[in-house]
């Protein structure tokens, strides 16, 4: 046990310094005066170098080898498994590759900002190609070190234990489902009446605070602020979420607050005892599971008809709304509009997975060498047409829209869609477990919903791997069935049978189908 | 040069981690959800242990010994002098004494909070006595290590290069001056008319923001927030100040903002090139010089009749004020009320030094063993009567009012009064240097005032020692003459001649007198 205890002591320090690094990032996005950017970058570099040094210390490797794993209980065993993972990733790359990649990321991102503003992919093409070379190098090195296929080795940083072979299967199924389903929704779904403003920022903030309080987010351990891109950070009794306000409409601000609150609850509900060990830190479950918690609130709960029954009166009160546009029905319709939009972050539940699948397929092909950077715009536009039925009018609304690739993050995108599917699977189980859930939500008793997630998912922190957790919570493996069921019920108003008419029905859509992950 | 360059590299990291520690403290006081206190304490401990380890690394001592000091330019020489000082203080105390003192400080402070609330010194007497034993032990160890008398060795942490023998002389002079001067002011100064409220917080904040902007504090590199006790932190392009608002009156909020802005300008105006080396960090000038910058704004500028000529219309506009109570004359009278109050932090310019001198004399006697803790309340009350002419009705308004001793800070108090005297000396010189200063201030051109401090004082950062700086800026050594002159002109409306009638005239009050510091 002594080696294990020494590891806990070392990781307590590492995790604490990482908390501090997270606070620096929060402060930079929310509070910091803008001219302090260079100095903050230096602070973060100094701290990250220190953290990297602690994570890659040879003593960690020795202690991991020496620890008596048979003597550990379940939480300790999960903890050391994550220590292995952290150490393997931290020591996988040679320092010079890390340095070259960081430099090329910064350059490419800078060029991308201008290229996107001017909607001109050719400006950033060379820089992205150079970055992709380094990403391929990284994938190769990590592949050998981690014993995973090249793309899997990249994805392992963001979605551990989710093999690309599994993701392929799941995404192919949804890719086959989406076009026909989207056509059906576009034909049958009524258009909402426009909800008239104005929507003053301060009123939106009050409404958002009311909603997250109702969700169970207490002032004693949380904050709500404003940032350019909503995010969540912190943990335990220091959870900080942000949103942003547009005066043109109010739903995106409160949806973003609910989304980030979902992340925040995960960070708050992990066991205090493990709060400074990897096993207690929800981030180490990977982004797919983390997104499942935010999307459970943002998509499953907060785009539901029941939810709007409770929210509509609050919204009318906040903005002095009157008349049929402000009915629960119309506000719900408005919050769940479906369309063939070009922008991922503005996409609805029906098209969102298709946006992600496109990116996943393209980045996999880029990493493997099947697709070269110069051919990216054409490949993007063709793929978009196939999945969503229209073609982007320009690259700004096409392959230039997201920062991920241009900042070196390959393997991240799939987590967004996986999180949505897992959320649907969890909430389907919740409906079976909680009788009268619908009535509770209409009455604003959201604690029932959040409490189920807390008990079944969040309190387990990283005790299970992601596939184990899904099985533990729902009694079966990850499946696309529940997402398709959810979409059918919400957007077509009809029960999902698991059969999609003329289309081929993939195995992964049947609840009884079990994959080996 | 190589040893020196290595020192710069090491101190860059230390100073950067210290910046991060300051941000953690700021966040704790201003932003952090309250339940996060334990976790934040752990973060700060981890970070401080790491900083302490870096500051006391034996390699620092070796490099300091090896560095070729003759090859250094003036800034580098000042830098290595401060490195010597930091290393000497960091390595002076054995680890077990540091640990025992931290523990006893925490205990004593906790007991003090209750004792103060219940105005019962006997509750905290034993705890303070135990802490004093450790303070005496600390003073003895540091005395040997630093080659200074015991009390000087403590004061050296807060006011380096200010020997207690000098402070004695200065304080004795002011102690002799104050009672008679206070009597004269109390007899002759008119009472202000009450300024009627309400003073909404948001309006006070807008006024404070207007004033600090007018002083030259730009949004791009600063913030103004709220905290229980106003303070300033950060540096360079990340300066953060706080104030607090009472709805009963508005002057204390804007005075506190001006005071903290004074600290903030010091932190902003130091040379960017040296911002991560000790010589570039204004804190290493000690608190006396730092307070001279805040008090130059808060006392010298912002309690002046000229200043209120500009502020009065802004205040009338902010609060919708009308009538004679809102005249510049009356607002100025109100902001410069003088009285025999018991509380230091509420004291006026006339009595403030006496509050400090009392504490200085008592803490020196406690450290030397002449005064025991059990006799503190009586000694306090007798000293207060002698200096300010009244006796505190209870210990809450007597020796229990300040946190300093109960948290182990002996040697800090004198810096407050020294700062006030130095500010008067600086601003007297400014008046000679800047023709028409009075008219500029009346017109709200505060940049002239702040710019002089920037050029003469702040841009020098720690290039000079405090006594050298005073001489560099004013052409002579520290003197009480200018403070007495300032008080006479502002509070009795008459020129100060250097002679105080029947009282003995100390050498230190004559501008031509020069002491060896």
Image (cartoon, coloured by chain):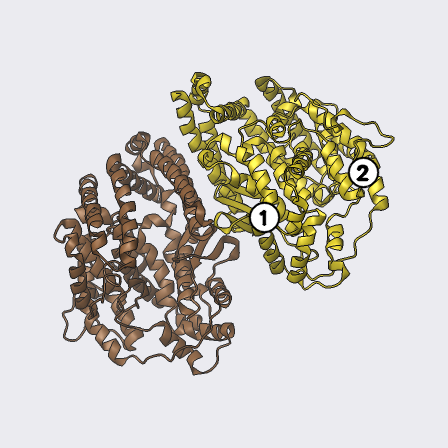
Chain colours: A yellow, B brown
Residue A341 visible from this viewpoint? no
Q: Nearer the viewer, residue B429 or A210?
A: A210
Image coordinates for residue A514, horizontal then vertical, percent: 70, 23
Q: Nearer the viewer, residue A89 or B301?
A: A89
The quadrant holding residue B66 is top left
Q: Closer to the camera: disc 2 or disc 1? A: 1
Q: Is residue B390 above or below residue A194?
A: below
Query: In terms of secondary structure, where does tag 1 sit?
Result: helix
Residue A204 visible from this viewpoint? yes
Q: Does residue A189 appear to the left or right of B382 in the view shown?
A: right
Identify the residue at the far left of this view. Answer: B370
Taking the spot 58% from the left edge, 33% from the top edge, the residue there is A103
Q: Which residue is mark 1?
A: A215
Query: In terms of secondary structure, where does tag 2 sit?
Result: helix
Q: Residues within 10 Å of mark 2 (few under 14, many from 20)?
A: many
Q: Nearer the viewer, residue A384 or A220?
A: A220
Image coordinates for residue A352, horizontal then vertical, percent: 73, 39
Image coordinates for residue A459, horizontal then vertical, percent: 53, 35
Q: Does residue A379 appear to the left or right of B147 in the view shown?
A: right
Q: Which residue is mark 2?
A: A388
Chain bearing tag 2 is A
Chain bearing tag 1 is A
Which comes sooner in the sequence, label 2 or label 1? Answer: 1
Q: Does residue B226 appear to the left or right of B83 in the view shown?
A: right
Q: Does residue B357 appear to the left or right of A168 in the view shown?
A: left
Image coordinates for residue B348, horizontal then vertical, percent: 30, 68
Q: Is residue A426 above or below residue B452?
A: above
For marks 2 and 1, give the CA distance: 34 Å
User: Mark 2 and 1 residues: CB-CB less than 8 Å, in contact?
Assistant: no
């Amino acid at each position: 046990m002594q080696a294990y205890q020494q590891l806990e002591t070392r990781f307590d320090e590492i995790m604490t310094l990482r908390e501090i690094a997270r606070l620096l990032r929060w402060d930079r996005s929310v509070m910091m005066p803008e001219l302090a950017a260079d100095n903050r970058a230096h602070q973060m570099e100094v701290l990250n170098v220190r953290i990297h040094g602690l994570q890659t210390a040879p003593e960690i490797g020795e202690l991991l080898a020496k620890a008596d794993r048979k003597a550990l209980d379940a939480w300790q065993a999960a903890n050391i498994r994550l220590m292995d993972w952290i150490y393997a990733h931290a020591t996988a790359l040679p320092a010079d590759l890390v340095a070259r990649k960081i430099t090329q990321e910064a350059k490419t991102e800078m060029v991308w900002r201008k290229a996107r503003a001017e909607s001109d992919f050719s400006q950033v093409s060379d820089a992205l190609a150079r970055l992709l070379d380094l990403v391929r190098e990284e994938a190769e090195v990590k592949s050998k070190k981690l014993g995973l296929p090249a793309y899997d080795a990249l994805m392992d940083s963001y979605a551990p234990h989710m093999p690309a072979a599994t993701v392929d299967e799941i995404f192919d199924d949804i890719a086959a489902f989406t076009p026909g389903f989207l056509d059906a929704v576009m034909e049958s779904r009524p258009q909402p009446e426009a909800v008239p403003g104005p929507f003053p920022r301060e009123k939106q903030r009050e409404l958002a605070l009311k909603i997250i309080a109702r969700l169970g987010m207490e002032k004693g351990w949380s904050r709500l602020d404003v940032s350019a891109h909503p995010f969540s950070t912190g943990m335990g009794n220091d959870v900080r979420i942000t949103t942003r306000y547009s005066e043109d409409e109010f739903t995106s601000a409160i949806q973003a607050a609910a989304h980030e609150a979902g992340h925040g609850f995960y960070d708050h509900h992990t066991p205090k005892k493990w709060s400074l060990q990897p096993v207690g830190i929800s981030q180490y479950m990977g982004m797919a599971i983390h997104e499942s918690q935010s999307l459970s609130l943002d998509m499953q709960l907060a785009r539901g008809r029941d939810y709007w029954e409770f929210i509509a009166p609050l919204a009318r009160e906040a903005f002095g709304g009157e008349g049929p546009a402000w009915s629960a029905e119309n506000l719900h319709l408005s919050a769940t509009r479906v369309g063939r939009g070009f922008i991922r972050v503005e996409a609805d539940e029906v098209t969102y997975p298709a946006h992600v699948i496109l990116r996943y397929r393209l980045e996999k092909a880029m990493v493997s060498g099947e697709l070269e950077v110069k051919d990216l715009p054409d490949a993007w536009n063709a793929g978009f047409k196939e999945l969503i039925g229209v073609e982007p009018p320009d690259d700004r609304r096409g392959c230039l829209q997201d920062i991920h690739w241009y900042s070196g993050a390959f393997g991240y995108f799939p987590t967004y869609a996986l999180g949505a599917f897992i959320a649907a699977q969890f909430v389907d189980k919740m409906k079976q477990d909680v009788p009268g859930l619908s009535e509770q939500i209409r009455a604003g008793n959201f604690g029932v919903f959040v409490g189920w997630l807390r008990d079944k998912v969040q309190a387990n922190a990283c005790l299970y791997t992601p596939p184990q957790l899904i099985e533990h919570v729902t009694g079966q493996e990850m499946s696309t069935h529940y997402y398709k069921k959810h979409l059918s019920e919400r957007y077509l108003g009809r029960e999902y049978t698991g059969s999609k008419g003329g289309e081929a029905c993939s195995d992964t859509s049947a609840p009884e189908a079990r994959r080996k992950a």
